[in-house]
Image (cartoon, helix red, strand yellow):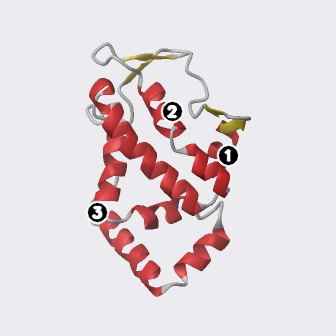
Amino acid sequence: MADVFAERITTDGNKIRVRLIADNRHVTANPNHLLPFQLGYELSYSTGTIAAIENGWSITTLTELRRHAVENYLKSFAAITGDLALITYLKSIIDAGHWEAYNHYVFVSVFPDELRTWYDIDTNRAAMDSFIDWFNGGHQLTLDQYNNVSRLIVEDL
């Protein structure tokens, strides 16, 4: 997932381009909402990318970028896109205090050395154990016909 951020968030002089959704041609907005999820999602990332790009890609910068995007999405777009399970779930991780450990878990395959350094600190090891206990205690993302990642109608290709 980190490589997707690096490939799809680019700069050109003083311009930032965010294109996280690869192909929007076959996705239309749910008629019950005014704005398609993917537009709000990409806009939520765009305002937090400068620091990540300036500081380089790492678990730390991706953790902050993603936190900013979730909080910005909820503040700016949730009312017009609807309540989305993915965003709600990510916010629940933040609220439970597991955001840093969760992101280290998500990006371990891309930044294994950063995880090892982070995990060697006792408080971080305890934070990862706490996240794993929380996750295994019934806090997985569950999707069904009423609880979707996105409130979009995907047309047949």
Q: Is residue 30 above or below residue 21?
A: above
Front position in the image: 33 or 140:
33
Residue 20 image offset from top left, x and y in percent:
57, 34
Going 55% across and 20% down the picture, which residue do you hit?
Answer: 24
Question: Label 3 sits on what residue type?
Answer: Ala
Q: Position of residue 75 (x, y in %)?
A: 32, 38
Distance from disc 2 to disc 1, alpha carbons, whole Å, reads 14 Å
The quarter of the rendered structure image containing the C terminus is top right
- Reading the chain from its start, which is encountered first: label 2 or label 1? 1
| Cα–Cα gap, marks 3 and 2 | 25 Å
Q: Which mark is residue 122?
A: none
The residue indicated by pointer 1 is 6
Residue 144 horizontal/vertical position (percent): 30, 37
Q: Are marks 3 and 2 in contact (CB under 8 Å)?
A: no
Q: Earlier in the sequence, mark 3 or mark 2?
A: 2
Amino acid under label 2? Glu
Task: Examine the rendered structure and indicate whether residue 108 appears above or below residue 147.
Answer: below
The disc, 3 or 1, on the residue closer to the chain's N-terminal end is: 1
Find the residue positioned furthest to the bottom.
122
The residues tagged by marks 3 and 1 sit, at their Cα atoms, a distance apart of: 28 Å
- Residue on which disc 2 sits: 42
Which residue position holds label 3? 96
Q: SS of the residue at dot 1?
A: helix
Q: Image point 68% across, 38% down: which residue?
A: 10
The reply to whether dot 2 and dot 1 touch (C-beta < 8 Å) is no
Horizontally, residue 113 falls left or right of residue 125, namely right
Q: Tell me which residue sits at (51%, 84%) in the image.
A: 121
> Label 2: how many residues lie within 10 Å, few (<14), some (14-19) or many (20+)?
some
Looking at the image, can residue 64 be seen?
yes
